Amino acid sequence: MCLIALAHRVHAEFPLVVAANRDEFYARPTAQAAFWQDHPSILAGRDLECMGTWLGVTTGGRFAAVTNFRDPADVRASAESRGTIVSRFLETDLPAAEYVAQVAARSSAYRGFNLLASDGTDLYSYSNREGNPRLLPPGIYGLSNHLLDTPWPKVRLARERLAEALKPGPATEPLFALLAHTDFPDDDELPQTGVGRERERMLSAAHIVSETYGTRCSTVVIQRADRTVSFSERTFGPQGAEQDTARYEFRLAG
């Protein structure tokens, strides 16, 4: 993922609300979100190159997502795929605290990443470019390709727009609209991550559009207090061409 806005236990009727964009090269082979045949409790898209995922949920109430920490100097070909951090968490029954501690213990195996992981009770954040795992209190959080809640313009605006969307009660289409903004901030607000001003500008939009790299999908997850979950994923092609929307609804087990 490259932009995540998340509300954790902010609304009494909606304990988890997620709106997220995955940005990737269009040439990278990807499977659209579905329940996995080899792990039927997992609902997620799938990176067919390394068989991990960027965001997923389970019928048992687990949720996880990962973003890359933007660092053009880190080009290790030997590093493990960051998407496997998410898929392994979704496959296991370990408490989030225990799993994230295991990831932290071998964090150097990966290039820079940020992880959000919830076992249905506790939500943890961890970056191998920061310190220790953090147990997150209830709140609205934003994450892109730096640390959690780094106030990049698109992160700040996504958090503000999510807070507004929660007031009437979250709904899928308004959350998709939150993710669809293609406007750029002023140049003096752009971060400086070492990729050059022109690319910083392109990457600064919530929804990235170009011919070879951009927002491949937008995902909205809404968990209700009655333990029903709606999961919707909208996919896009080069130049932002809208493709399919997959929609799932299920009740958490247990």
Image: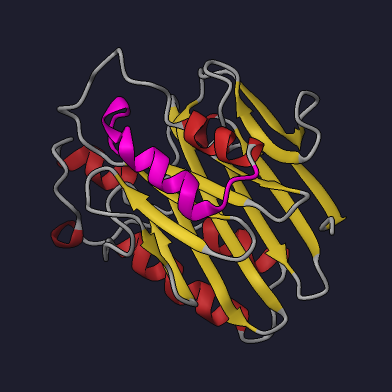
**Residues shaded magenta:** 93-112
Task: Please tell me which residue lies in front, 85 or 195.
Answer: 85
Q: Quadrant of residue 42?
A: top right
Question: Is residue 113 visible in this depiction of the protein?
Answer: no
Q: Quadrant of residue 25?
A: top left
Residue at image location 82% in from the left, 49% down from the top: 248
Question: Is residue 234 visible in this depiction of the protein?
Answer: yes
Residue at image location 44% in from the left, 76% down from the top: 160
Question: Looking at the picture, does residue 144 appear above or below residue 76?
Answer: below
Quick check: is 102 in the magenta stretch? yes
Question: Looking at the picture, does residue 244 appear above or below residue 117?
Answer: above
Q: Position of residue 12 (x, y in %)?
A: 67, 84
Q: Quadrant of the C terminus?
A: bottom right
Q: Is residue 46 left or right of residue 128?
A: right
Q: Position of residue 35 (x, y in %)?
A: 79, 35
Q: What kind of colouring is applied to the model shown?
A: secondary structure
Q: Position of residue 26 (x, y in %)?
A: 51, 24
Magenta segment, principal secondary structure?
helix
Residue at image location 31% in from the left, 26% down from the top: 109
Question: Looking at the picture, does residue 104 appear above or below residue 144?
Answer: above
